[in-house]
Structures are given as C-alpha cells and as structure tokens.
Amino acid sequence: MTDASGPTLPLGRSGRPALDRLAFERLSVAHRRALKLHCYRMMGSLNEADDLVQETFLKAWRARSQFDGRGSARGWLYAIATKSCLNAIKARSSARRILEQPERPASVGAATGGPTAELAWLDPYPDAELPDIADDRPGPEARYEAREAVRLAFVAAIQLLPPRQRAALLLCDVLGWSAIETAQLLGGSTASINSALQRARTTLGNRQVRAPQRSRPSADEGVLLERYMQAWQADNLDGLVELLREDAVYHMPPWREWYHGHQAIGAFLGSVWGNFAGYRAVATRANAQPAAGVYALGRQDSTWRPHSLHVIEAADGKIASLTIYVPPLGPALFAVFGLPPEPLP
C-alpha cells in the first residue's frame, strides 16, 4: 500500500512511542496544510477546520504509542481528522454550509430580503494555503485532482451530502483510498461504502460540479479577472455584464437571494451599484479560482473600507459563476486572505 492511499491503521503497541517529540513536530509541519484542507472540505468552515486540525494533532500526540511505524503516518492522521470532523458535524447546530438554498428559485430584480444569520454559509479558502499541497499525490482510486476538489462549487455540493457519504467520497474519490480502507475507518462493509459512494457521485453528477481539467491557473483567467476589476474601478456596469456568460449564476452570502442569467445579475447589480462613491480592487485567489478584494468609498465620509470578496468561476473566457461575499461576511475575510485594511494609493 502506498503512503498516498491511506492507512493500514496501526496494528499494535510498541514498548515506547514510535514518534518522539521531534518526529511528531516534523509530521505536523509536513501534513498540517493538507489536513486543514481535508477538514475544510468536510466542514465548509475555515475556523472549524483550524480547530479540528489542532484537535487532530492533540489526539495523535496522545495516541502516539499506538502508531508503530509500519502503517502510513499520513493515513493515520487522516483517519483521526475524519473521525473528529464526523463527531463535530454531529455536535454542531447546523448540519451543512451552503452557497444558496437549492430549493429557492432564482431572484429577479432588486433583492427584497436581507443578510441572514441563521444559515451557515460556506467559507472561501485562501489559495495561499494551497501551493504546498497542489501536487499532493492521491492514491490510484482518486477521481478528482487536488485543485478541482477545492473549488467552491465542489465544496458547496458535498455539503449537501450526508456526513458519511461526504467522508466516503473525500476519502475514496479525492484522497484515493480503497473502499476496503474506507470501510475500516467508517465502519460497515465494503458494499455499504460502495453504495454510499454511488449515491454521493449521483448527487454531485446531478449538480454538474465537474470543472475543466487543469492543474494550474491559466493566463486567460488572469486577463478575465483584470477586466473584471477594471469594470468595478471604472464604474462600468455594462462592461462587467459583458464579462458574464448568458447563463451565469450569482450568489451573495449572507443574503439568501441568488440570480441566474447575465441580465438578471446586471439588473440586481444596477440596483446597488450607486451605494458607494467608488470602488477599488486587489487581486487574490480563493478555492483555486480567480478572486478579488473590493474596497468601497463611503459617500458620507470619503473613506475607503473593505467591502466584499469576489470569487469567479471562468468558462470559455467568461464568468460562469460569481460569488460575492458581501457585508458583514466580506470585510471579515480580508485579513484571512492577507489583504490590507485599505487599498494602496
């Protein structure tokens, strides 16, 4: 069994820990970012992912005498992290994190609701956390490459899966574990894991979350993002709408409303475009997708403030999906993405 595939869970106890403090510290440095991404995929939350990685290493340190060095240390840690995530999902009040409510129809015109605190919204994931794991080697069973499996659409879709299906899909189709190994961790038979996988794959297939196969950002994406930011900064709403596909989709957490079609998106943006005196944008990346932090100039005090984080999904040279994290969620994400509190002069 390769180290990439997953664990043969520790088979026995040795007289003294197989991992001393120095070896354990090296292990934590080597695998922390990959484990955080795994927990993020399971939970849909950056804060919960951070907490669960800490919990994983604490549990692993306490149980280090159970690891005899014959199995995969990486797989051993993933097993602990997955169990911790499943327990956390059972304990928390919200069962899933979403981008929109699938049962709600797309909105038309100006939004009539307001920010909603009762829904658990999917967090974006900073690409700054991804470079060290972009070439992570999954096992032979994997169906997704690392960057495809962190896209907002993918992570949002798997939040709709029951926790056991979600774990099975991540372990098998993303990490490349076998059904036998996954059954050892989750419990149950290999047949039950294969059944859970089939149901999970059907759900994702119905939501059409597959992305074009690519392992690195493309130059076209960079050009598209630059044109998008220029449209905001030049107060050019028509130019922005021209960048959208006709069937584009727009989400704006923490609002429930979402929009389908470039005309509907343009009509909504037109209803709020003049709320501020101007906009500036700084490029970043989130979930292996082009993104921008947008600052807004207040009309009353002429002060620039963080306003929103924009994440775009490109297809055929245009924007197929636009997710804008607006206040109060958006400004809180600027520090997470390493964006300054105000735009540079």
Image (spheres, rainbow, N blue to C red):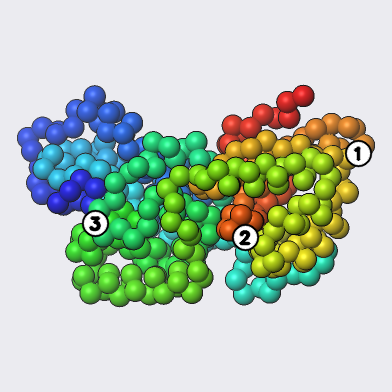
Judge from the rendering whether residue 261 lies leftward or rightward of residue 79; answer left or right: right
Amino acid, disc 2: Ala
> SS at mark 3?
loop
Q: State the residue in front, 84 or 172.
A: 172
- Which type of secondary structure does the marked residue at label 1 adopt? loop
Residue 70 in the image: above or below residue 118: above
Q: CA distance from mark 3 to mark 1?
A: 56 Å
User: Which mark is on residue 140?
Assistant: 3
Query: What amino acid does circle 1 point to?
Result: Arg
**Helix, strand or loop for disc 2:** strand
**Can residue 70 be seen at all in this image of the molecule?**
yes
> Residue 228: x percent and y percent?
70, 46
Q: Is disc 2 surrounded by few (<14), some (14 to 19) or many (20+) residues within 10 Å?
A: many
The amino acid type, in three-letter code, at marker 3 is Pro
Mark 1 vs mark 2, CA separation in Å: 32 Å
Kindly indicate the quadrant of the structure image that contains residue 248: bottom right
Q: Residues within 10 Å of mark 1 (few under 14, many from 20)?
A: few
| Residue at the image point whose x is 50% and y is 36% from the top | 128
Write down the quadrant of residue 120 in the picture: bottom right
The reply to whether the C-beta atoms of the residues labelled 1 and 2 are less than 8 Å apart is no
Residue drawn at point x = 79 percent, y = 40 percent: 233
180 lies left or right of 270: left
Q: Nearer the viewer, residue 163 or 340?
A: 340
Q: Quadrant of the C terminus?
A: top right
Q: Residue at x 14, y 33 (%)?
A: 17
Q: CA distance from mark 3 to mark 2?
A: 31 Å
- Check disc 2 and report the residue beneath it: 320
- Counting from the top left corner in percent of width and height, residue 208 is at 50, 69
Question: On the image, numbered disc 1 is attached to which residue?
Answer: 299
- The mark nearer the N terminus, 3 or 1, is 3
Q: Residue furthest left?
A: 15
Residue 198 or residue 96, whichever sits in front: 198
